[in-house]
Image (tube, rainbow, N blue to C red):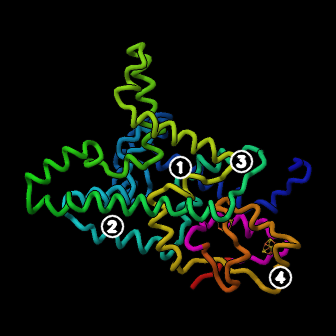
Amino acid sequence: MNLKDFKIKDHLITIFRRIVQIIAFILINYVILELIFSVNLIGFESLFKILPVLNSPRNPLSNGAGILEYIFFSITVGVIPIFLIGVLILVVLFTNRFFCGWICPIGTIQDALAAIPTNKKVLKISTHKSLLKIKYVTIIFLIILLIPLGITYSTNISFYIDYKNNLGDFGDKPLSYFSLSEYVFVFFPNMIKEIFQTSSLGPIFSNLLVFFISIFFLILIVLSVWYPRAYCRYFCPFGACASVIGEYSFLKLSRSPVRCVGRTECGICEKVCPKQIRILDEPFEFFTGKGECNYCLKCKEACPYKAIDIKIG
Ligand code: SF4
Ligand code: SF4
């Protein structure tokens, strides 16, 4: 867009969202504040830890861990964290995926990359729909793999120890192997550091799995320049859970059948949607894109006919 054509009033939602995202990014990764201002904010740790943030406790940029990480960890020690599961369900029911669109630091990084002016690509619908399933398969795979840990923790401790040892790090922090932040902020930088320290490529070969997954996640991040929110769409485990609950959220969007002129005449909302949601195939009364909508409100902001609205209830 030509800078001369940029009108602040047309972009108020995005500007406000960017401010919220930056503040949230700094607060969640409050180690940044500690570094800049030489203060100790450890007292806030418990507050940050209950936020549904998909950052691993090992992430040096975040002392907080995600609610999903805690839920999965609890399952591995035989505890069904009803309170945390209840919090997760209630938060998504009342706020939909507002967290994904406005708070999540990984979402913020992807949005920053997507802001690089390039021609955004759209996947074939069938490919997009197939890829969407990856995150659900991941979650189901994790649950199947981890439930025996939880059951044997209190019933057959020797089986538990054997099984956990076989799972290695994965048994301790199950989500970390699926967490983009873990690789990009922890594993990969550590590997690079070791390569420099040892002046050899040994660290790569000593953990090829980590190396390849790190490269995969890095590619995924770079891809978000052309395919906005690629990680959120297809791989994020929190996104998978939030999508399932978000479909039933009280917070939705609606599209006026009177104002909307349709795809042939306009279709701008679909073009700006970072999640490639077929907004115009959704019902008028309310939609959540089958729980994929991250409530960024870009469609609402971009609609020239003011046809899209926030819907509560
Ligand atoms: S941008 Fe607005 S008018 Fe255009 S297709 Fe979307 S909802 Fe309809
Ligand atoms: S449907 Fe609208 S609010 Fe939802 S992700 Fe797409 S652009 Fe954002």
Marks 3/4: CA–CA distance: 29 Å
The answer to whether mark 3 and mark 4 are in CB contact below 8 A is no
The answer to whether mark 4 and mark 2 are in CB contact below 8 A is no
Looking at the image, which residue sits at the far right?
A: 4
Quadrant of the picture in which ligand 2 is shown: bottom right
What residue sits right under mark 3 in the picture?
115
The answer to whether mark 2 and mark 1 are in CB contact below 8 A is no
Residue 233 is drawn in which quadrant?
bottom right
Q: For the residue carrying disc 3, how many other residues have a C-alpha within 10 Å: few (<14), some (14-19), or many (20+)?
A: few
The image's mark for residue 259 is 4
Residues shaded magenta: 290-309
User: Is 277 or 86 nearer to us in this picture?
Assistant: 277
- Amino acid of disc 2: Leu
Task: Tell me the residue at 44%/53% (across/down).
Answer: 54
Residue 113: where, in percent of width, then height? 66, 44
- Amino acid of disc 1: Ile
Q: Secondary structure at mark 4?
A: loop
In magenta stretch: residue 32: no
In magenta stretch: residue 294: yes
Q: Main secondary structure of the magenta part?
A: loop
Q: Is mark 4 within 8 Å of ligand 1?
A: yes
What residue sits right under mark 2 in the picture?
84
Marks 4/2: CA–CA distance: 42 Å
